[in-house]
Amino acid sequence: MTLDKIIDPALKKVPKIEVKDVKVWYSDFNAIKGISMDIKPNTVTAFIGPSGCGKSTFLRLFNRMNDYIDGFKLDGKIKINGDNIYKKKINIEELRKEIGMVFQKPNPFPKSIFDNVAYGLKIQGINDKKFIAERVEKALKQADLWNEVKDDLKKSALSLSGGQQQRLCIARTLAVEPSIILMDEPTSALDPISTAKIEELIFELKEKYTIIIVTHNMQQASRISDYTAFFYLGELIEFDKTKKIFTNPEKQQTENYITGRFG
């Protein structure tokens, strides 16, 4: 069963991501302690909590990046489009086409702007130059970067500003047309103007994508997300609509964190 043959989650009947009682260990260290949540399609979900609370570990479960860490072990189930992504016979390359990732610091390759965006298509074996050029233009437009770089596509991506580089990395992710985008503190290294552009972009992209963002910025989480999950010491303390989390949380621990009393 492949990921794209499941019921279309746009029907809103099936969660895009289902997490059931997930526990994670790194050798003897229990990093994630029995977390369950459903993430709806075409929403932005923010993961908040103090450093070391498990947010990034949890985020990287969805594209199986933790598999590379020594001693990693997972219990429980994670389903994407209804398909268990930790079953034995899963094509991880196909999974990662479905799930794009944007990191904390912009990480453009030392190549041209064009080649950066085209990279994922080329490693998939796509050679049609017209198709690649169209997809690169589309991705740069989606990332709100096309008008700034369209006359300089052969220029090194490393010559771009930090904010432009991060939007380029988003375009590189979009070029392979995933359905989920994971973002691990994508604006923490950027200035306020660049941050605002990325936030506007996230808001626009959720029409087509399901987005999960790890952020330490409470204001950012409240501005851009539909749902917020508060993590503490590997546990999911509270998960609800963002408005409720920020105005009327059920747990005192959540209120203490949001109001700056700890963390």
Image: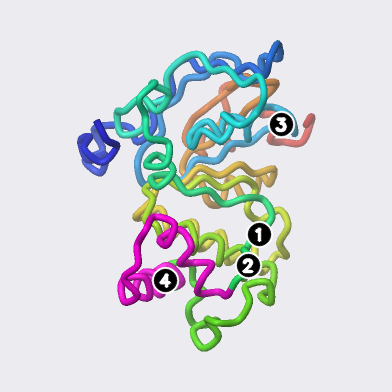
Amino acid type for the residue under numbered disc 1: Pro
132 drawn magenta: yes
Marks 2 and 4: which is nearer the front?
Answer: 4
Seen from this angle, which residue lies furthest right? 262
Is 123 placed left or right of 233 in the picture? left
| Placement of 122 over or under 260, stated as above or below | below
Q: Secondary structure at mark 3?
A: helix
Amino acid type for the residue under numbered disc 3: Tyr
Decide which of tag 2 and tag 3 comes sooner along the chain: 2
Q: Which mark is residue 178?
A: none
The stretch in magenta equals 112-140
Q: Which mark is residue 165?
A: 2
Residue at 25% in and 44% down: 10
Magenta segment, prevailing SS (helix, strand or loop): helix
The residue wearing badge 4 is: 136
State the residue in front, 64 or 105: 64
Res 176 → quadrant: bottom left
Decide which of tag 1 and tag 3 comes sooner along the chain: 1
Decide which of tag 4 and tag 3 comes sooner along the chain: 4
Image quarter where the N terminus lies is top left
The residue wearing badge 3 is: 257
